[in-house]
Image: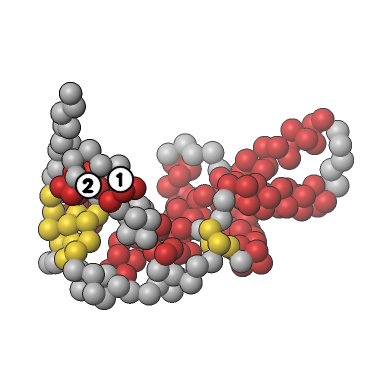
Amino acid sequence: MLRRVVADLYKPGAPLAEVLFPDMTGTVADVAWYRGPGARRIADRQRRIAADEFAARIARAGDLNDAPADHVFLRARRADVLAVFLLAERARLNGLPLADAHADDRRRGVALPEAFSLVAEIADFYGEFKRREGIVDDADILTGPLYPAADCPLVLVDDAHAVPAAAQAAVARLFPRAALVAAGGPGGMIERLWAEERTIRLALTPRVIQTN
């Protein structure tokens, strides 16, 4: 919503891509990636390849073969592995220990392996796979090296209530001198998340563009 407001101030109804370029708009991770070392970002296809590789380990350890029941079992394990990959990234984004994130998600009914030892093993494998392939996820981008834009005077953060801890810290590192305008979220939530004195908090409503 905030990006739409900014674009309309420049030119009512203008496409966002015409006003806000990729290195200055998008998610915090998108902007941070342009101001980082430039490592390749992981894609769903690569996560699936990693999950297949870990499932192959399980198959070897269990001496599984091509029986239909084995295929069903391994399909379920691949789903578990992918879920743990996302859990590991989400935990790092929110600054949580993996064990706490696992317990929280299990309480909320998220489908994850029950044994934390297996979760930790899969998370370690995920990190090893990314390092081996030279790829990064959003948590790696936001917590990794960044090149600050010290001359940037103003940063606008939309949906600020949904910005995780790692992204908030990255904004502070990327734009150390900028004033921050944080918009969105239920009352009180932005104040708790974006408590810096240099932050201005706004509640914005969509602007209706009249067309003939």
Q: What residue sits right under mark 1 in the picture? A: 16
- Does the CB distance between marks 2 and 1 fall below 8 Å? yes
- Confirm whether residue 90 shows in the render: yes
Where, quadrant-wise, is the C terminus in this rendering? Answer: top left
Task: Pick whichever of labels 2 and 1 is earlier in the sequence.
Answer: 2
Q: Quadrant of residue 14?
A: top left
Please report the residue visible at 73 percent of the width from the left and 52 percent of the height from the top: 53
Amino acid of disc 2: Ala
Q: Residue 108: give x, y in percent of width and height.
A: 42, 39
Mark 2 to mark 1: distance in Å? 6 Å
Please report the residue visible at 45 percent of the width from the left and 44 percent of the height from the top: 105
Q: Residue 39: give x, y in percent of width and height.
A: 53, 66
Q: In this view, does 130 lie above or below 6?
A: below
Q: Residue 50: give x, y in percent of width and height.
A: 67, 53
Where, quadrant-wise, is the N terminus in this rendering? Answer: top left
Amino acid of disc 1: Leu
Q: What residue sits right under mark 2 in the picture? A: 7
